[in-house]
Amino acid sequence: MKADSDPRLSSAASVRSLLEQANNLINEQ
């Protein structure tokens, strides 16, 4: 992803990745 080079997208990308990590943890249980 090129979100790191675009400050406008970096926060949205980090939030999305956190949501994906939470989903993965929920799905594993």
Image (cartoon, rainbow, N blue to C red):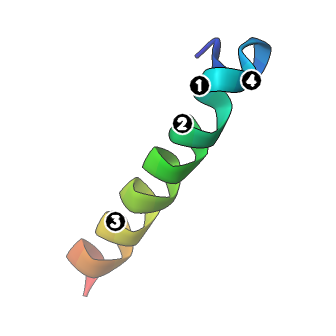
Of callouts 2 and 4, which one flags the residue occurring earlier in the amino acid sequence? 4
Mark 2–mark 3 distance (CA, rounded to whole Å): 16 Å
Are there few (<14), some (14-19), or many (20+) residues within 10 Å of tag 4? few
Mark 1 touches mark 4? (CB < 8 Å): yes
The kind of residue tagged 4 is Pro
Of callouts 4 and 3, which one flags the residue occurring earlier in the amino acid sequence? 4
The kind of residue tagged 3 is Asn
Q: Using the image, determine if residue 16 lies above or below residue 9.
A: below
Q: Disc 3 designates what residue?
A: 24
Are there few (<14), some (14-19), or many (20+) residues within 10 Å of tag 3? few
Q: Is residue 29 left or right of residue 14?
A: left
Q: Which mark is residue 7?
A: 4
Mark 1–mark 2 distance (CA, rounded to whole Å): 6 Å
Of callouts 3 and 1, which one flags the residue occurring earlier in the amino acid sequence? 1
Which secondary structure, mark 2?
A: helix
Q: Which mark is residue 13?
A: 2
